[in-house]
Image: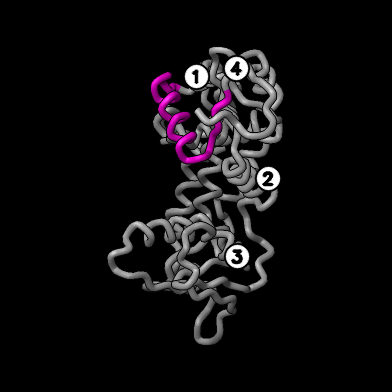
Amino acid sequence: MIPHDGPPAQDAQVRPQSLMLSFLGVHVLNRGVAVFSGSVIDVFARVGVSEEAVRSTLTRMVKRDLLARHRDGRRMYFGLTARSAAVLEDGEHRVWRSGAVNDDWDGTWTMVGFSLPESWRSQRHDLRSRLVWGGFGPLQSGLWVAPGVVDVPNLVDGLDLTEFLKVFTARTAKPTEADQIVHAAFDVPAIAERYHAFLRRWDREHPLPDAPDDLARQLLLHTEWLQLVRQDPRLPAAHLPRDWPAIRAEQVFRVLAEAYQQPARSIAESVLETIPVAGSPTDL
């Protein structure tokens, strides 16, 4: 058990959209429903998110094709789109199937080289964001690397930058060692500290005692863990410290996720108002 150094509410900063994606992934994905905005507001009040912030987040996610509006009488409901379903399924895969510890790496790296016109700042930012999402780190100017084989075309889909990319799979050769790549392209201490921060918050007998219920704890737990694994390039365990904190952190997450699952579901069923949805949403 790791000691805690202060009020839990001060340890983690999560954005309303991150919380919303976690909520949708746990309580909406694969259920064929849309959720009444008022009940979403009720859920988010449990974690200190204001009604104004919830409504703003819902509107912004509709504009980004991450949510679709459905009207039923005078009430507005929000459901998933194909885009948000894909994002949530990717998150589910990372949380429950990929795992945080890469202990079966085969020595392969995926390398991406690119050179964009200097004026393309927005495109460069978008590309780098996608690469980080895919587990890449910058090895040197214009050359990024990730452990394992990465589906780069899928990762950069929609950016229209294919002609500017050079993609390779490779293995290190003398005098270069894999350990050098790990520590040159990735901030290993920063990755470790994110896991330590998670443990300070959650590795305790009664995490978040000030939270109103287990639905709130579930929402915060899943959001923080998903943010962690999405920022983690899953570096090969053989080239990390033996006491790598992701090992303990993943154990803590899984135990708590199971403990919160049933009580959170019961609370959600009593709070959430939903309607079944099928076909194209209303374009409002």
Q: Earlier in the sequence, mark 1 or mark 4?
A: 1
Q: Is residue 259 visible?
A: no
Give me the residue at 56% from left, 80% from top. Answer: 172
Residue toward you, 68 or 13: 68
Distance CA(mark 2)–CA(mark 4): 35 Å
Question: Was residue 9 drawn as part of the magenta stretch in this picture?
Answer: no
Give me the residue at 60% from left, 34% from top. Answer: 80
Query: Mark 1: which amino acid?
Result: Ile
> In the rendered structure, are the residues bearing label 1 and label 3 in contact, judged by CB atoms less than 8 Å apart?
no
Distance CA(mark 2)–CA(mark 1): 28 Å
Position of residue 73 measured from the top left corner of the image (x, y, whole percent): 58, 13
User: Which residues fall within the magenta stretch?
Assistant: 48-70
Mark in the foreground, 3 or 2:
3
Position of residue 247 measured from the top left corner of the image (x, y, whole percent): 61, 50
Q: Secondary structure at mark 1?
A: helix
Question: Was residue 65 drawn as part of the magenta stretch in this picture?
Answer: yes
Which residue is denoted by mark 2 in the rendering? Answer: 96
Q: Is residue 136 visible?
A: yes
Quarter-of-image position of residue 77: top right
Q: Which mark is residue 72?
A: 4
Which residue is denoted by mark 3 in the rendering? Answer: 150
Mark in the foreground, 2 or 1:
1
Q: Which mark is residue 73?
A: none
Q: Earlier in the sequence, mark 2 or mark 1?
A: 1
Query: Mark 4: which amino acid?
Result: Asp
